[in-house]
């Protein structure tokens, strides 16, 4: 009898990993909506692999007030007033806000007017909601920041223990091969380099899905046609956003729309869509031409220069501990297939 029970419990134990693998991952999307943010949010809400615990709003593409309004309209469109949507920081930690209506349209959503939201804002402060949710579900929550890192920096500064309590943090931000703001910096990092520096040095491994890979993950008019072939409130909205975004990108010499934020969400849905390499990443906060650059060390070490009389000599190297999993490539075709199939018919 004992042996029989032992066999049963062994069988039950062997089922646990499978069951855990099937349960959706809890995520918090910290966002500055934003055309590609809207795409990322609706991708997440239509993916059974994810359970969106909250949206927290950060100033970036638009100011915090507009961002909150946009997010509430997006969750309302998806019929998901059950998801807490909370405002956050009012401005970056140490500089003035830079908004991006140039790329995202006058209201951040291509100038499209969504119906008035049926959902109400959560009264909690975004960074506090992040802390609370991580403590409620220790080692289960994946943070997906797809805007400037202000809210995340505020949260991990107030409660550093969250760095050891998250399941993962997957950011859209940075680049290891040139910027999209200037020669060096990607917009989310450039908009709050001090916050980004806090986040990269918080003690967790930051998965960094950068603009350089987003720009090789392009939505073209062919994908747009695919989306336009089927109608629903969400797919019609995304198709209009995509049309605006592709047109805007073409004017700037791109072959289509860089799927920055949706790729970060997709990397959590299906990690096999991206290729990662562990590196040490520092955020430049001072450089004359490079403020906001994510400086990635690909060798895992720095030269150790020691003073000998009137000059320095290299005496070996100093090993660096990786603090980031840097995305080097994406499977763009498979990502676009996932994205359009999840949005179509919704
Ligand atoms: Ca964004």
Image (spheres, helix red, strand yellow):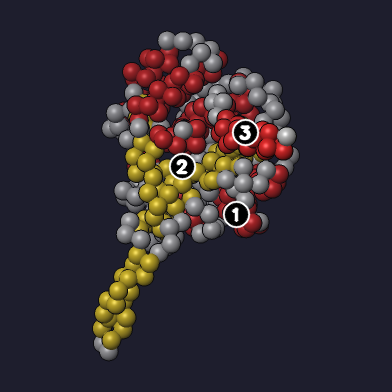
Q: Is residue 181 above or below residue 15?
A: below
Disc 2 to disc 1, C-alpha distance: 20 Å
Q: Nearer the viewer, mark 1 or mark 3?
A: 3
Out of 8 and 3, give the one closest to the viewer: 3
| Cβ at disc 2 under 8 Å from ligand 1 | yes
Image position of 177 (left or right of 33): left
Quarter of the picture holding the C terminus = top right
Q: Mark 3 or mark 2, which is nearer the start of the sequence?
A: 3
Q: Is residue 200 above or below residue 146?
A: below
Image position of 32 (left or right of 126): left
Q: Is residue 169 above or below residue 83?
A: below
Quarter of the picture holding the N terminus = top right
Q: To which residue does mark 3 refer?
A: 11
Out of 30 and 334, give the one closest to the viewer: 334
Query: Residue 281, located in which quarter of the rendered image?
Result: bottom left
In this orientation, does residue 24 appear?
Answer: no
Disc on res. 172? 2
Disc 2 to disc 3, C-alpha distance: 41 Å
Image position of 336 (left or right of 146): left
- What is the x, y in percent for residue 205? 49, 52
Out of 102 and 176, give the one closest to the viewer: 176
- Residue drawn at (35%, 30%), measured in percent from left and top? 332
Disc 1 to disc 3, C-alpha distance: 32 Å
Disc on res. 164? 1
Element assignment for label 2: strand
Badge 1 local density, few (<14 within 10 Å), some, or many (20+)? Answer: some
- Residue drawn at (43%, 58%), measured in percent from left and top? 322
Query: Residue 15, located in which quarter of the rendered image?
Result: top right
- Residue drawn at (62%, 26%), measured in percent from left and top? 75
Q: Mark 1 or mark 2, which is nearer the start of the sequence?
A: 1
- What is the x, y in percent for residue 129? 68, 44
Element assignment for label 1: helix
């Amino acid at each position: 009898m004992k042996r029989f029970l032992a066999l049963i419990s062994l069988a039950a134990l062997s089922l646990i990993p499978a069951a855990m693998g099937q349960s959706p991952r809890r995520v918090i999307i910290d966002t500055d909506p934003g055309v590609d943010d809207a795409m990322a949010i609706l991708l997440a809400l239509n993916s059974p692999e994810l359970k969106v615990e909250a949206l927290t709003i950060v100033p970036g593409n638009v100011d915090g007030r507009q961002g909150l309004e946009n997010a509430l309209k997006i969750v309302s469109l998806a019929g998901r007033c059950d998801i807490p949507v909370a405002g956050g920081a009012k401005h970056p930690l140490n500089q003035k806000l830079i908004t991006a209506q140039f790329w995202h349209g006058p209201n951040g959503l291509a100038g499209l007017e969504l119906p008035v939201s049926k959902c109400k804002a959560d009264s909690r402060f975004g960074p506090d909601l992040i802390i609370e949710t991580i403590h409620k579900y220790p080692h289960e929550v994946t943070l997906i920041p797809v805007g400037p890192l202000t809210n995340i920096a505020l949260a991990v500064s107030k409660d550093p223990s969250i760095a050891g309590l998250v399941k993962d943090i997957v950011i859209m931000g940075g680049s290891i091969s040139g910027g999209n703001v200037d020669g060096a910096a990607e917009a989310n990092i450039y908009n709050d380099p001090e916050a980004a520096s806090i986040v990269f040095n918080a003690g967790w491994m930051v998965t960094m899905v950068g603009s350089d890979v987003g720009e090789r993950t392009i939505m073209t008019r062919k994908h747009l046609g695919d989306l336009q072939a089927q109608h629903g409130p969400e797919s019609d909205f995304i198709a209009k956003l995509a049309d605006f975004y592709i047109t805007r990108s073409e004017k700037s010499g791109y072959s289509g729309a860089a799927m920055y934020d949706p790729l970060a969400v997709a990397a959590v849905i299906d990690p096999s869509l991206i290729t990662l390499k562990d590196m040490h990443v520092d955020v430049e906060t001072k450089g004359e031409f490079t403020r906001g650059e994510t400086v990635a060390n690909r060798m895992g070490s720095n030269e150790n220069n020691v003073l000998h009389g009137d000059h320095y000599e290299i005496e070996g190297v100093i090993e660096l501990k990786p603090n980031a999993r840097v995305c080097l490539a994406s499977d763009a075709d498979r990502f676009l297939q996932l994205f359009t199939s999840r949005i179509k018919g919704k």
